[in-house]
Image: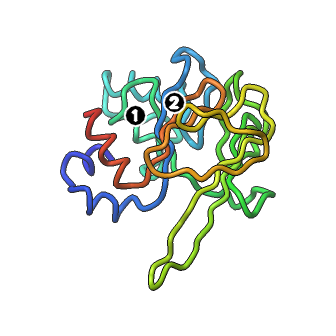
Amino acid sequence: MEDAVSFMGPRAFAGQYRGFYLLGEIPDANEDDFVTGVISIGKLAEIKRREKASTIPPPGYTEGDLIIESKVLEFGRFVVEMKKHTNNAWADWISIGRAANNDLAIKHTTISKLHARIQVEQIADGSEVVTRHWLTDTDSTMGTVVNEERLGSSTPHLIESGDSIGFGSVECIFVDATRLFEELRKLI
């Protein structure tokens, strides 16, 4: 993705990396068990060390893994695509929480087992299909915040690209591919 950000324009990048993402910071860069999607702080640190020592990727690394983001992002940052796991029991929403069976597992002490969920809604608007995302806090202990406003439990909140989101003390930005390109350009 580093090459894509460096050499592609925003339109070509958005065409290749369609979708929506969470771009955020790991609250404690020394915490080895923070995981979101396929990114873990331990793997990021291992890749950083190996990149300095050699060009051999760590065991288990494949080109399609989002681990490649460590080449673009500073240590302590992450990016993960908002997508549904095929084995997840909740078919109509993307689950976010500390438990491993969530679509996005964030293993951090300020994250509840099932912290929040995002429902993806597609509606026809003339000849176009518009995708909307509704974020709902699922009665989490430490709460969910959107643009500095704490969400009420079980109350859906419409989120849009560029919104800042806090799950406990994990801070993220919800972005589409175009906004992801802009944010990554700032980091390189």
**Crowding near pointer 2: few (<14 within 10 Å), some, many (20+)?**
some
What residue is drawn where x is 49% and y is 45%? Answer: 174
As displayed, is residue 166 above or below residue 52? below
As displayed, is residue 62 above or below residue 140? below
Q: What residue type is labelled 1?
A: Ser
In the image, 65 versus 28, the foreground residue is: 28
User: Which residue lies under the disc numbered 1?
Assistant: 70
Pointers 1 and 2 in contact (C-beta within 8 Å): yes
- Does residue 92 appear left or right of residue 19 in this picture? right
**Corner quadrant of residue 88:** bottom right
What residue is drawn where x is 59% and y is 43%? Answer: 37
User: Which residue lies under the disc numbered 2?
Assistant: 43
**Crowding near pointer 1: few (<14 within 10 Å), some, many (20+)?**
many
Residue lying farthest to the top in this orientation: 30
What residue is drawn where x is 59% and y is 17%? Answer: 31
The C terminus: image quadrant: top left
Gap between marks 1 and 2, in whole Å? Answer: 9 Å
